[in-house]
Image (cartoon, rainbow, N blue to C red):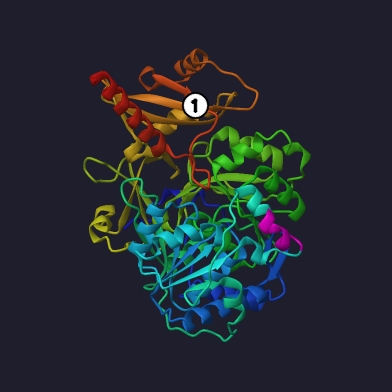
Amino acid sequence: MLTTIDKVWLQSYPKEVPHTISYDESCLHDYLRRSTEKYPNHEALHFLGKDITYKELYEESKKFANQLLSIGVKKGDRVAIMLANCPQGVISYYGALMIGAVVVQTNPLYVERELEHQLIDSGAKVIICLDLVFPRVQKVRSKTNLEYVIVTSIKDYLPFPKNVLYPFVQKKTTGIKVEVVYNSHTIAFKPFLKAGTTKEVEIEMDPVEDLALLQYTGGTTGPAKGVMLTHQNLVVNTMQCIHWTYKTTPGKEKMLAVLPFFHVYGMTVCMNLSIMNGFTTVILPKFDIKDVLKTIEKQNITLFPGAPTMYVALINDPTIKDYDLSSIKACLSGAAPLPLEVQQKFETLTGGKLVEGYGLTETSPVAVANPIWGKRKSGSIGIPWPDTDVKVMSAETGESCEVGEVGEIAVRGPQVMKGYWNCPEETAQVFKEDWFLTGDMGYMDEEGYFYIVDRKKDMIIAGGFNIYPREIEEVLYEHEAIQEAVVIGVPDEYRGETVKTFVVLKEGRTLTEKELDQYCRKHLAAYKVPKYYEFRDELPKTLIGKILRRVLIEEEKEKLAEEQKASNE
């Protein structure tokens, strides 16, 4: 057990943040009821002009819960939600939790193969999906345990006249007009919900043991695995977040929710945090620069969690100075490293604070973050949250590393997952006693601030040297002409591996390969300088804007295979 002396990071806590928090043993959905009792007529959700109060949200969630019971969904059954950010997603989520069901958040961008794997693996009995993705669900339906498909549309919660115009806009922008044939097992969301009762749902649950969520990992090292998160895991992480954002006021803040709720980061830091604290959640179904800027100004947004690529896009938009963004108090950046230049420019433009945090799906997700209104360090992911222990472990010995020594980051705390769904061997591999092994390489400084040097599997070994892509990317982001950059290792006959970098230039800027190479040689040790440079108009990304390094690696492998095939012919 770590002693207080070991937890040197506690000395860097702002005085307003407690070292430990008292958590009551409540289920996550209990906090929706509590916020409704405190703020019944306060705006809970704002969606493209549609307002929903806490009382209305709670009643809609109860209706959905009772309707799930009416079609035979029981405690422990898995309920998949395949929606973009919209009120239906919040209603379905809390309604399912009320009856003890386990939510399976499902990315609407999944192709049939990914969707089929997740539905089969989770054994989901019901899925709530958008009409746009219904054809994909139909194609895999017979191979799964799905008994019911509940279909909704973005227009279902749009105000008049947007709800009337939406089908035409949808057909024009997507080229898709979906026709759903409804029957007893393919159900329309709105009438299904309308038929429900607002009777209180009383299901006995154990917050510590009962699952609230199966959140599937990205599957970068094989098929995606379902991370088992309990009610307590999610409640704890949300409460930790509340204490970290201590300058916010319950019932007063406006949270911009453009991070997708189907991602654990958006789900905890946007949706659950807002509901627990009585905030107004201003929902956008997708990230669009102009929509975000307009919404911040019009709605006086105070909290805006996001991913670095979102902030990069905003600060590089030439019209940003035309908008008043001064309402922003705090932004917690996650999902990828936050370049210093981006942080500084965003804070200058808004007057708010932007800090980097760190976590994984397996930690619900946040484990470490820089103090928002306290001491923060450039390049650091920050210090562990209350009740969270973090250490660096030697890859060779498994023992704790010395200060400044690079090893694997390990986390222990009440927000750490129960394990992987139906994967006991994989679960055992990522736990050393009660420490969760993150797979990230990093180190701790003398004040308890942690630094990530890279993913364990992303480390490049070139000529015997360990090269961490993140370090090179930080240097690239400091170049005034570069908007985005990512570094990968590619095969090399002499060094085993060597460095290749992909860059996207800022609009209107030019940069030659020779100029970029000279810049890198000036700022990096010779063995870290990329051997190959590739300029692109855009980089492959997830829906939350995380650059997909693995896609670029796969592209390089395919390119190499084609070259070898051609040389053999």
Vertical placement of residue 53 versus 242, above or below:
below
Tell me the quarter of the picture where residue 87 sits. bottom right
Q: Residue drawn at (53%, 68%), measured in percent from left and top?
A: 181
Amino acid type, mark 1: Val
Locate the C terminus and report the quarter of the image it occupies: top left
**Residue 165 is inside the magenta segment:** yes
Q: Position of residue 40 (x, y in %)?
A: 69, 76
Tell me the quarter of the picture where residue 393 sits. top left
Locate the N terminus and report the quarter of the image it occupies: bottom left
Q: Residue drawn at (65%, 39%), measured in percent from left and top?
A: 314
Near-viewer residue (168 or 144): 168
Is residue 280 shown to the viewer in this render?
Answer: no
Residue bounds of the magenta highlight = 161-168
Q: Position of residue 308 (x, y in %)?
A: 55, 41
Near-viewer residue (256 or 235): 256
Pointer 1 local density, CA inside 10 Å: few below 14, some 14–19, many at least 20: some
Near-viewer residue (323 or 109): 109
Q: Is residue 497 left or right of residue 244?
A: left
Q: Is residue 463 left or right of residue 370?
A: left
Is residue 278 shown to the viewer in this render?
Answer: yes
Near-viewer residue (313 or 79): 79
Vertical placement of residue 545 versus 527, above or below:
below
**Residue 44 is inside the magenta segment:** no
Vertical placement of residue 567 versus 14, above or below:
above
Residue matched to label 1: 475
Q: Position of residue 114 (x, y in %)?
A: 39, 53
Q: What element does badge 1 sit on?
A: helix
Q: Position of residue 140 (x, y in %)?
A: 39, 60
Q: How many marks?
A: 1
Q: What main secondary structure does the magenta stretch of the protein show? A: helix
